[in-house]
Image (tube, rainbow, N blue to C red):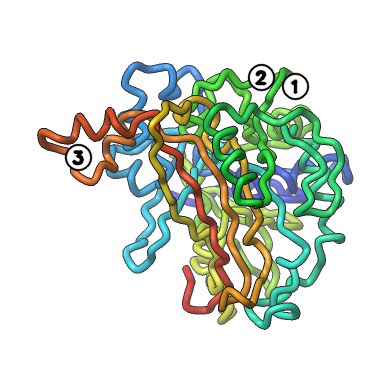
Amino acid sequence: MPTTRLDPVDVVVVGSGLGASAFVRHLVDTAPGLRIVVIERGGWVDRSTLPALKADFQRDVLGGYATSPNVRLAAGGHAPSADYAIDDSGSDFKPLMWSGVGGSTINWAAHFPRFHPSDFRTRTLDGVGDDWPFSYADLEPFYDLNDARFGIAGLAGDPAYPPKPVRPMPPIGLGKLGMTAARGFDRLGWHWWPVDSAINSRDHDGRPACNHCGPCQQGCVTGAKASTDMTHWPYVLDRGVELRTGAVVLQVEIEAGRARGVTYRTVDGDVFQPAQTVVVAGNGVGTARLLLASGLASPALGKNLMFHGAGYVRGFFAEELDGPVGPTGCAIYSHEFYETDRSRGFVRGVHLQVTRENPLAVQAARLAEPWGADAHKALLREFRRSMAILVVNEDFPEAENHV
């Protein structure tokens, strides 16, 4: 079947996740009148079908609505996310991503942290990693802009950061879990602060306040969690942007050393969309994958892939906590050990975050002995009585980490 060639446009964007959403919205506001086409391999999420509305939603947490595309594919796939398998057998990191309108904001926990100024100068300050070509101060206006566009619930005044504007909404309540952790941090003399989150603590921007139903990473049924299928795409579509879903980009077409458009595949055949400007926004894995498939020969392409390395420390309490109640990523965090302290014997540091606990089935799946006579007793002992602290470490750019 021959490839259909369309009329040229000003800008074609590959992907509709967080990066693409922010770029297109900014372009619409600053350069109105451009003809912009966005190509997305997946589709729109139908919130009436999300797991939290079903009695067996916990099964989907471990299957069709898992955060990993590999797990979703093994469970039979999920139509709104046009997943492709990722060979992560050689990596300790497992991908969290969604290939549909909104990208991984569909299944993110919506914690909305910023880098510290030192993160942009690790080579200069500590002799590791690489310095960024811009500073925190350069990026700060765009941090503020995105805070406003997403609608951040939080509390200004955190001493670990340069001053931030007043947040659009107050923070999500800490709950008994967060308050218990805060008292412990206070006794230790450690820094802590309520998280900034892209989740409504009150009605905001046409979306309701969070009802604390909990399974945020399987899509938000109420719309309280900001995802760009709600916060960005309706806005830009109303202003003339065209979004084509169910269209898998095969390659960026190059002529005389310049990107001239993209070829994509739909159920009706292959299509070439010429454009004056081509923007590839398919996340750290998908962007490199597409550019490699397009024949780009740069030896740096796909290298220095970076993730958030993370592990959990979990403690158990005699009293009952409310860990499984409320948004997954919303309680408190600590940057007590964020900056370099050479007396510890290493440079850089960690972000500590007290997170909500998982639903019952997920906690049961991680028991040391998930079957047998003692499993039920262990689950009763742990459920609603545990606290998890997420430890997020630095991941430096290294050529060996690549797509």
Q: Does 98 appear above or below 302?
A: above
Disc 3 target residue: 370
Which comes sooner in the sequence, label 1 or label 3? 1
Which residue sits at x=63%, y=54%? 281
Amino acid residing under circle 3: Pro
Which residue is situated farthest in the left direction here? Answer: 373
Residue 75's spot in the image, x, y percent?
28, 38
Q: CA distance from mark 1 to mark 3?
A: 42 Å
How many callouts does the rendering have?
Answer: 3
Q: Looking at the rendering, which quadrant does residue 108 occupy?
A: top right
Say whether marks 2 and 1 touch (CB < 8 Å). yes
Q: Image check: 325 left or right of 252?
A: left
Which residue lies at the image location 44% right of the left edge and 55% below the top edge? 311
Q: How many residues crowd mark 3 within 10 Å: few (<14), some (14–19), many (20+)?
A: some
Res 41 visible: yes
The three-letter code of the residue at mark 2 reads Ala
Q: Position of residue 150 (x, y in %)?
A: 73, 35
Asked if the residues shown at circle 3 and circle 2 are in contact, with their CB atoms under 8 angstroms apart, the answer is no
Image depth: mark 3 or mark 2 in front: 3
CA gap, disc 2 and disc 1: 7 Å
- Viewer-proximal residue, 222 or 393? 393
Question: In front of the other: label 1 or label 3?
Answer: 3
Question: Which amino acid is tagged 1?
Answer: His
Q: Are marks 1 and 3 in contact (CB under 8 Å)?
A: no
Q: Looking at the image, which residue is at 35% across and 61% down?
A: 87
Q: Which residue is mark 1?
A: 204
Reading the image, the residue beneath label 2 is 209
Of the residues under marks 3 and 2, which one precedes in the sequence?
2
Residue 246 visible, this orientation: no
Kindly report the distance in space between the C-alpha atoms of the residues bearing marks 3 and 2.
36 Å
